Amino acid sequence: DVKVTQSSRYLVKRTGEKVFLECVQDMDHENMFWYRQDPGLGLRLIYFSYDVKMKEKGDIPEGYSVSREKKERFSLILESASTNQTSMYLCASHSPYIGELFFGEGSRLTVL
Amino acid sequence: DAKTTQPPSMDCAEGRAANLPCNHSTISGNEYVYWYRQIHSQGPQYIIHGLKNNETNEMASLIITEDRKSSTLILPHATLRDTAVYYCIVRAPFGNEKLTFGTGTRLTIIP
């Protein structure tokens, strides 16, 4: 069964902390994505990557960075967490050669 | 910005067909229409996709207008478990593009 796994379902961090959200996929997909989801705003794209060590900004990259050192792993980094980054974060992957997008279960981050 | 627009919410009686519209008036010739749904507290899941012909699978049917500027997802016999947020997106079959979602339609199935 195909799988996108996010390391933590729930996290609570303090303002100013560095936060790592990890995502691993087992489908050998080239493309991986990070979204955040907030009430009334839908899914908004933060960053995406179409190959190892490649990254592209999405619609709301400010305050975030990403790392893709291996094909199966895509990490989202909050260098200095702020309260307005409290949100649900969703990772997804797909092959660029057609096919659906597979999502992880999400990581709910609370920044105090 | 999302390339699609959907109504923010809809209700449907249990057992009836739920018809969810999506407008994608700027769709390109090679872009597919994909539908996903997100049940509370879970990641979105794929439902169906199509290019220009109508499609059906075990979950739903997808009707795409002849000019491809809009489509309708049909859940033929809605159940309470179909209560979810439904997203429509468009994407090309090849290449490395960012995939943007809108706010989707919150479908509530009424007992």
Image: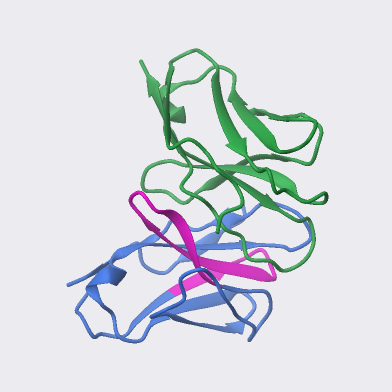
- Which residue is found at the position 30% from the left and 85% from the top? A80
As drawn, the chain in blue is A
Rendered shade, chain B: green
Residue A53 falls left or right of residue A104: right
Query: From this viewpoint, is residue B59 visible?
Result: no
Residue B72, given in percent of the width and then of the height, sits at 63, 29
Find the residue positioned furthest to the left: A112
Q: In this view, does B28 lie above or below B84?
A: below
Quadrant position of residue B92: bottom right
Residue A78, image x, y percentages: 36, 81
Query: Quadrant of the rendered structure where residue A73 is?
Result: bottom right
- Residue at the limit of the structure toward the front, as seen here: B25
Residue at position x 25%, y 85% from top?
Answer: A17
* Quadrant location of the C terminus of chain A in the rendered image: bottom left
B19 or A69: nearer the eye? B19
Q: Position of residue A36 (x, y in %)?
A: 42, 63
Whether residue A105 sits left or right of residue A29 in the image: it is left
Specify the segment rendered in magenta. Answer: A22-47
Question: Residue B49, located in which quarter of the rendered image?
Answer: top right
